[in-house]
Image (spheres, rainbow, N blue to C red):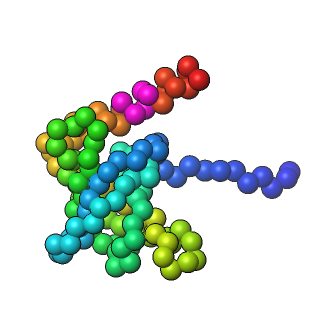
Amino acid sequence: MKNVNRFIERRRYIRLQAPIGMSYTVDGTEETHAASTKNISAAGLRFETFDKKIEEGFLLEMKLNIPSAPNAVHVKGKVIWKKRLSLEDQTPFDVGVEFVEIEEDNKNTFLKFLCDLLYLISEERKNG
């Protein structure tokens, strides 16, 4: 029998390509950084930053600017990984964050946004 490499999906949730404006502060600091998500799921997100100080294990206080939501969604997350996008010094980092807590008042807004994105994707595939 041939040795066949199989792709095994380890993620629990689908990642959706969604550029959402956001800001974050590293827990225990007051400096706010602006960023934009590259993808998002019910369990976490990926964003790009020039912040060299951010490290794996850091806790972040994030505000996600969900389109059509009246207020930002407040989320706490833990940095799981950080990678430089290129070998050049002036390139940004990609950062993977796992959600630790979503403010109770914001859970429905966040989940509705994810459901709406999934619906739009399925409609585009159906009509495309």
- What percent of the width, then of the height, locates residue 82? 44, 70
In the figure, 64 relative to 120: above or below? below
Q: Residue at x 31, y 65 (%)?
A: 78
Q: Is residue 7 left or right of residue 18?
A: right
Magenta stretch: residue 38 in it?
no
Q: Is residue 75 shown to the viewer in this render?
A: no
In the figure, 45 relative to 60: above or below? above
Q: Is residue 94 left or right of residue 59?
A: right
- What percent of the width, then of the height, locates residue 18? 42, 44
The quarter of the picture where residue 3 lies is: bottom right
Number of numbered discs on residues: 0
Q: Residue at x 65, y 50 (%)?
A: 7
Q: Quadrant of the C terminus?
A: top right
Magenta stretch: residue 119 in it?
yes
Which residues are drawn in magenta? 116-120
Most foreground residue, 107 or 9: 107
Q: Residue at x 25, y 34 (%)?
A: 68
View extreme (left): residue: 105
Q: Is residue 21 shown to the viewer in this render?
A: yes
Q: Main secondary structure of the magenta part?
A: helix
View extreme (top): residue: 127
- What percent of the width, then of the height, locates residue 118? 43, 32
In the figure, 34 relative to 37: above or below? below
Q: Residue at x 42, y 27 (%)?
A: 119
